[in-house]
Image (spheres, rainbow, N blue to C red):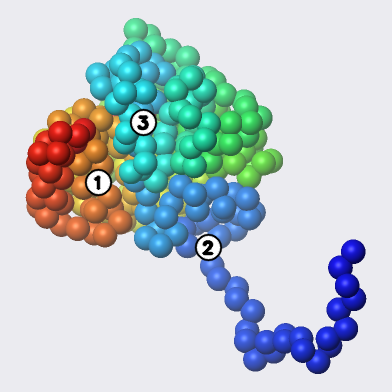
Amino acid sequence: MPEADNSKDAKNYYLDVPVRNDLFFLKGSNSYDWGMKNRLARIFNPASGKTVMLAFDHGYFQGPTTGLERVDVTILPLAEHADALMLTRGILRTTIPASTQKPFVMRASGGPSILKELSNEQIAVDVEDALRMNASAMAVQVFIGGEFETQSVHNMTRLVDAGMRYSMPTLGVTAVGKEITRDARYIGLASRILAELGATFVKTYYVPGFETVTASCPVPIVIAGGKKLPELDALKMAHNAIGDGASGVDMGRNIFQSEAPVSMIRAVRKVVHENMKPEHAYEYYQEMKNAAAGAGVGA
Ligand code: R5P
C-alpha cells in the first residue's frame, strides 16, 4: 500500500493552465472513440497527417504477383520504411514476424480470382480475427457501378458495423471495373458513397481533377499506385495527389516492382511527408540506389 499523501501544500493543480482539448488531427475523424483514433494515429503520422502504406495484398485474387513471389525476401526489407502495411491474414501469419511494431491494414474482403467476376466478393475476415491479429484497420473492396455493386457495398457496411463495436477503422477501397471511365466524376462519386456509408478512410486512384474528389469526400483519402510506372512518374503522381488533398499513398507495384524498392519507398516518403518536389525525390532515389549498389547491399 502506498504511504499516505499528506503533503497538501506541496500539490500543484496548475490552476492557471487551461486543460488541453485538442481536435484529432485527421480529417473527418474527430467524433470517433479513443480506440479508433489511436488506431488511425498508428496508420497516419500525427506530425505530417499523412501515411505511406505499403500494399502487398494483391495475391488475394491474383496469386503470386510479380514481385510478391517471395514476400519474405522482397517485402520484409521494405517494411521498416512504411508507416503501415496492407496485407492478407495468410501472409501476416505465415511471413510477418509477430515481433513487428509496424501497424497493418488487413484485407478483409475476397472470393473471386482473376478468372471470375471480381465484384462478386464477400467478407473474408471476421472482425474478431482482425482484433486477434492486432490489426489497425480492415480493408474492403467496393465496386461502384460493378455487377455486384450492392453486395460489395453491403460487405463494407457490415464491416463498418462490426468495426464500430471494437473501434476498428474500415478502409473502403474503390475497385474500378474495366468498363468504367476512371475520371474525377466517377472517383468522386465512388469515394463519396463509401464515406457516406461509413468508411473511416478511402483508398482510390489518382485522376486529373483530384482536388474535387478530396474536397467532396469528408474522410481521408489515400491513393493506390496502380500499374508500374517509371519512378519519376510515380513520384509525380504521389506529389500531385498530396497537393490535391490526399492524406497519403497505399502503394504496391510502384514500390515492390521498382528496380530499387528500398530507395523508391524512401523517395516516396520524402514526397508524402516532406512535400519534396518529385524531381528532387527522384534525384534522392538515384543517390540511394547508387549508394546501395556501391555498398553491395539491397537497393
Ligand atoms: C489491389 O486490389 C490491391 O488491393 C492493392 O492493395 C492495390 O491495388 C494497391 O496496390 P498498387 O499500388 O499495386 O495498385
Horizontal arrangement in the rendering, residue 125 relative to residue 2 (left or right) = left
The answer as to whether callout 3 falls within 8 Å of ligand 1 is no
Quadrant holding the N terminus: bottom right
Residue 249 position, x and y percent, is: 32, 44
Q: Earlier in the sequence, mark 3 or mark 2?
A: 2
Residue corresponding to mark 3: 76
Q: Which mark is residue 24?
A: 2
The residue identified by callout 1 is 266
* Left or right for 187, reference 220: left
Mark pair 1, 3: CA separation: 15 Å
Image coords of residue 81 (percent x, y):
33, 43
Q: How many tags in the picture?
A: 3
Is ligand 1 less than 8 Å from the beta carbon at label 2? no
Q: Is residue 284 left or right of residue 136?
A: left
Marks 3/2: CA distance?
A: 31 Å
Q: Secondary structure at mark 3?
A: helix
Label 1 vs label 3, nearer the camera = 3
- Asked whether 14 or 198 is in front, the reply is 14
**Disc 1 residue crowd, few under 14, some 14–19, many 20+, Cα 10 Å:** some
Residue type indicated by callout 2: Phe
Dot 3: few (<14), some (14–19), or many (≥20) neighbours within 10 Å?
A: some
